[in-house]
Image (tube, grey):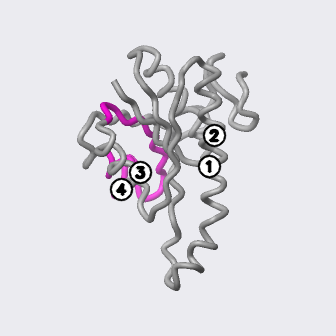
Amino acid sequence: MKILAALDLSAYANFVLAKAIKTAKQQKAKLDIMVVAEASGEEGDAARRERADRPLLQAATRAARSYQERALAQGVTAKVRVRSGISAAEEIIKYQQAEQLDLIVLGRRSRRDWDAHPMGAVAQRVAAYATCTVMVVRCMETRDLMGGADQFSTVTGKKR
């Protein structure tokens, strides 16, 4: 079995990662970790857009390495993929199909526009278009970040 943890740069990513690691352990699965640096939708020349997006791509790369280290600390080896694109959902779906993944684990944390996107736009699109099972982890409230002893601090990245 091959699992993708699709993470972002939010404080909730650690919560989603913990669920993906637990599932990978239970299923004795391979784990891929993906962070998508969503490119800005600004008009203008490509060079200017690339300069504007570079810091976000660097932050995504740092976060992906940190997530990989956390997985390894929990006994799970993970490949890391950092993508840049205008649509995080599209990048996740393309990767899932190319790698023939069995499960995507991602979070939902939308509070805005609840009627149009009750799961969040990215989670909704991935769930609708992925050709594998999608586990959407509820991450809407601060209390979701507070867990048992196996939860990571979102600030320090260490076990509580």
Q: Are marks 4 and 2 in contact (CB under 8 Å)?
A: no
Precedes in sequence: disc 2 or disc 3: 2
Q: Which residue is drawn at the image coordinates 37% and 36% (left, top)? A: 104
Of 20 and 45, nearer the camera is 45
Q: Secondary structure at mark 4?
A: helix
- Is label 4 or label 2 in front? 2
Q: Report the residue marked by disc 4.
A: 90
Q: Report the residue marked by disc 3.
A: 120
Q: Report the residue marked by disc 2.
A: 65
Q: Secondary structure at mark 1?
A: helix
Q: Quadrant of the C terminus?
A: top right
Quadrant of residue 27 within the rendered picture: top left
Answer few, some or many: residues within 10 Å of disc 2's Cα (few below 14, many 20 plus, some between 14 and 19). Answer: some
Q: Which residue is drawn at the image coordinates 34% and 32% (left, top)? A: 103
**In the displayed structure image, the side of residue 129 where residue 70 appears, left or right:** right
| The disc label shown at residue 61, or none | 1
